[in-house]
């Protein structure tokens, strides 16, 4: 089953950081997989949601490489993209993340992503990280 067909019926799709990396860097393998996800959102099929944590994770590599121009491009994309809702890390998200981490031994950044998706009432959590599992009705969709 292709990735896009797994999103049928979803109103809100949470994208993990790796999805944005593949899209913004035009990854040779995963860009063709993630591009239709963004195109469908642009067509109004669903809303893309992610956490402010995604921005921080996206900026690490450009800063390591001294590429502030790339960091600016990433920041502007997430801040200005009409199809992406950049969700703040609230106290409720942090509380849920701690509970997820405690119960499932999930890394804290992953737990924050999952908690954000749950708080934002997302139907699907899209990632390429097989360690990420569904929680509370949040359905995982893997890119590969």
Image: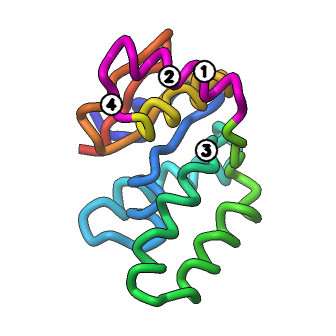
Inter-mark Cα distance, 3 to 4: 15 Å
Compared to 92, does 31 lie above or below?
Answer: below
Q: Secondary structure at mark 1?
A: helix
Q: Secondary structure at mark 2?
A: helix
Q: Nearer the viewer, mark 1 or mark 4?
A: 1
Inter-mark Cα distance, 1 to 3: 15 Å
Asked whether the beta carbons under mark 3 and mark 4 sit within 8 Å of each other, the answer is no
Q: Secondary structure at mark 4?
A: loop
User: Few, some or many C-alpha atoms within 10 Å of disc 3 (few <14, some 14-19, many ≥20)?
Assistant: many
| Magenta residues (range) | 90-107
Asked whether the beta carbons under mark 1 and mark 2 sit within 8 Å of each other, the answer is yes
Mark 1, residue position: 95
Mark 3, residue position: 51
Where does residue 43 sit, x and y in percent of width and height?
Answer: 67, 50
Nearer-the-camera pick, 115 or 6: 115
Nearer-the-camera pick, 72 or 11: 72
Q: Nearer the viewer, mark 1 or mark 3?
A: 1
Q: Residue at x 63, y 50 (%)?
A: 52
Q: Earlier in the sequence, mark 1 or mark 4?
A: 1
Inter-mark Cα distance, 2 to 4: 15 Å
Asked whether the beta carbons under mark 1 and mark 3 sit within 8 Å of each other, the answer is no
User: Few, some or many C-alpha atoms within 10 Å of disc 2 (few <14, some 14-19, many ≥20)?
Assistant: some
Mark 4, residue position: 132
- Whether residue 33 sits left or right of residue 8 in the image: it is left
Where does residue 144 sit, x and y in percent of width and height?
Answer: 23, 44
């Amino acid at each position: 089953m292709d990735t896009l067909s797994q999103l049928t019926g979803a109103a809100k799709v949470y994208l993990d950081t790796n999805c944005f990396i593949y899209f913004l860097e035009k990854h040779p393998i995963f860009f063709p997989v993630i591009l239709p996800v963004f195109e469908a959102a642009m067509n109004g099929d669903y809303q893309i949601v992610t956490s402010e944590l995604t921005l921080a994770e996206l900026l690490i590599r450009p800063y390591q490489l001294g590429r502030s121009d790339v960091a600016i491009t990433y920041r502007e994309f997430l801040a200005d993209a009409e199809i992406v809702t950049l969700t703040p890390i609230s106290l409720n998200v942090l509380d849920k993340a701690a509970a997820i981490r405690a119960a499932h031994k999930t890394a804290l950044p992953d737990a924050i992503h999952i908690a954000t998706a749950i708080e934002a009432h997302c139907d699907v959590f899209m990632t390429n990280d097989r360690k990420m599992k569904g929680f509370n009705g949040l359905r995982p969709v893997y890119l590969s």
